[in-house]
Structures are given as structure tokens and as C-alpha cells.
Amino acid sequence: MFRFYRGPSGVRAQAMDAQGNLVDDFVFDSGDGDIASRILHVRNAPSPGATSSLAIAEMINDKVAEKFNLKR
């Protein structure tokens, strides 16, 4: 028999735009320069991230292909 105990609530960070509004979707960005321009950051993973992981992976794949001019 298993016993379950109530645990503390979690806090999930959410991105804000320059005007202070909450961002409800992914934010993709990269930096300038030789190394930074070859990196794509994926920020602000909205909930439920895990339950839609295959769709999220496809979206990230599309963004990477577009940014780095990859053939599909």
C-alpha cells in the first residue's frame, strides 16, 4: 500500500515582454558573434510542456531549420 503526502506548490517562471506583459508562448532568440549566432535559445516553455513534447520538438525543429538554413 502506498501513502501519499501533500507537498508544496511549485512556482513556474513566465517570461515578460519589454512592456511588462506576460508572454504566453515560446521565445526563440540567439546572440550576435561567431559562437552566439550558432545557438538558438528556447525560452518560456508554457505548460503543459511534457504532454505536448512531440509537437514542441517539431516546432523547434522547424525553427532550427529556418534559422540555420538546413534542408529538410
Image (cartoon, grey):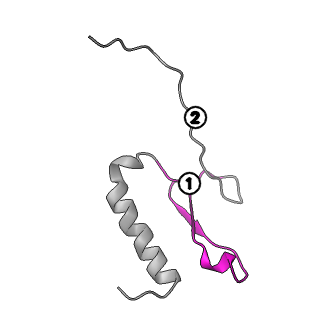
Residue 11 on image: x %, y %: 58, 34
Q: Is residue 41 above or below residue 51?
A: below
Identified by mark 2, the residue type is Val
Disc 2 from disc 1: Cα separation: 13 Å
The residue nearer to you, when weighing 7 against 21, is 7
Q: Is residue 8 above or below residue 48?
A: above
The residue lying at 54 percent from left, 31 percent from top is: 10
Q: What residue sits right under mark 1 in the picture?
A: 44
Of labels 2 and 1, earlier in sequence is 2
How many discs appear? 2
The residue lying at 47 percent from left, 82 percent from top is: 66
Residue numbers of the magenta segment? 21-46
Is disc 1 surrounded by few (<14), some (14 to 19) or many (20+) residues within 10 Å?
some
**Residue 34 shown left or right of residue 58 in the figure:** right
| Residue 11: mark in rendering | 2
Q: Is residue 2 above or below residue 38?
A: above
Secondary structure under badge 1? loop
Is-magenta flag for residue 24?
yes
Residue 48 on image: x %, y %: 40, 46
Residue 38 on image: x %, y %: 61, 79
Is-magenta flag for residue 31?
yes
Quadrant where the N terminus sits is: top left
Q: Report the predominant secondary structure element of the magenta stretch.
A: loop
Q: Is residue 59 above or below residue 9?
A: below
Would you identify the image quadrant in which residue 17 lies? bottom right
Quadrant where the C terminus sits is: bottom left
The residue nearer to you, when weighing 66 against 3, is 3
